[in-house]
Amino acid sequence: MLIAIDVGNTNSVFALYKNDTAIAQWRTSTSTQRTADEYAVWLSQLMTMEGLNIKDVDDCIISTVVPQSLFHLRNLARRYIKVDPFVVTSSSVPGIEVRIPKPSEAGADRLVNAVGAYSKYGGPLIVIDSGTATNFDIVGDDGGFEGGIIAPGINLSVQALHNAAALLPRIAIERPEKIIGRDTVGAMQTGIFWGYVDLIDGLTRRVIEEYGKPMKVIATGGVSSLFEGALSMVDHFDSDLTIEGLKEINNRLKNLDANTERYV
């Protein structure tokens, strides 16, 4: 079995695949302090509840935007899964050309999303990943990564309002019934929710206009489901895109021809 691990700034996802089929998935808060032993206990208990055994896992791939977590996850793979995990970096993803001046600046999560989206939907496309940040990643006709946009995430904006303005409360993100708020919470909910809807739709329109040809638009990320039914520019909502991208990268690695450094 393959375990695919996606570590984001806020949450981490662990997914199990058997013969290319997803059989289980778990989400936990990202922590740089959690040790390999703690991960193993947590993971073993969850697997046991599903009738699975950690000893049956024999492959591991990791994508992380939190470098401090990598030491413990590598130890988890080496000590309990008995494999050296493949760690996704800007220079280690087979079959994708990174077409920006400094390829090392392309985050692992963005490249994984690009691979996952292209393998499933083809190109060109825009991947909108709504998490701690809101990323817009541009993928070409041939699957190449062509840059994008990074904006603050919606939860980050809510937190910033609360922290910076003494009289503004911490609010839950909800879709308000009316645009004009009649109280402080209503006004904030409108500004946050519909402000992000217009940010996403507006930037997407600008990208397509600048790109000069039709593009598919895919939304993913921990909070993307908040916007289902509100975004006019999104073609597909796909919450498992990053994990599916990791599985696709792992499949490419298995088919890699070591002599030609090309996957087949």
Image (tube, rainbow, N blue to C red):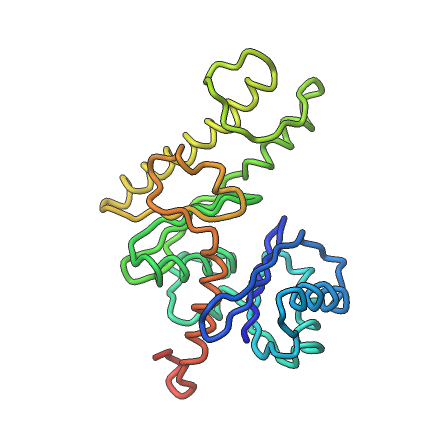
| Residue pictured at 38% horizontal, 66% vertical | 96
- In the displayed structure, 259 sits above or below 252; it is below
Q: Quadrant of the N terminus?
A: bottom right
The mark total stands at: 0
| Residue pictured at 66% horizontal, 54% vertical | 28
124 vs 237, left or right, is: left
The quarter of the displayed image where residue 249 is located: bottom left
- In the displayed structure, 70 sits above or below 59; it is above
| Residue pictured at 39% horizontal, 84% vertical | 257
Farthest residue, direction left: 213
x and y, in percent, of residue 248 in the image? 43, 68
The quarter of the displayed image where residue 33 is located: bottom right
232 vs 104, left or right, is: left
Q: Quadrant of the C terminus?
A: bottom left
x and y, in percent, of residue 89 in the image? 52, 65
The quarter of the displayed image where residue 63 is located: bottom right
| Residue pictured at 47% horizontal, 73% vertical | 250
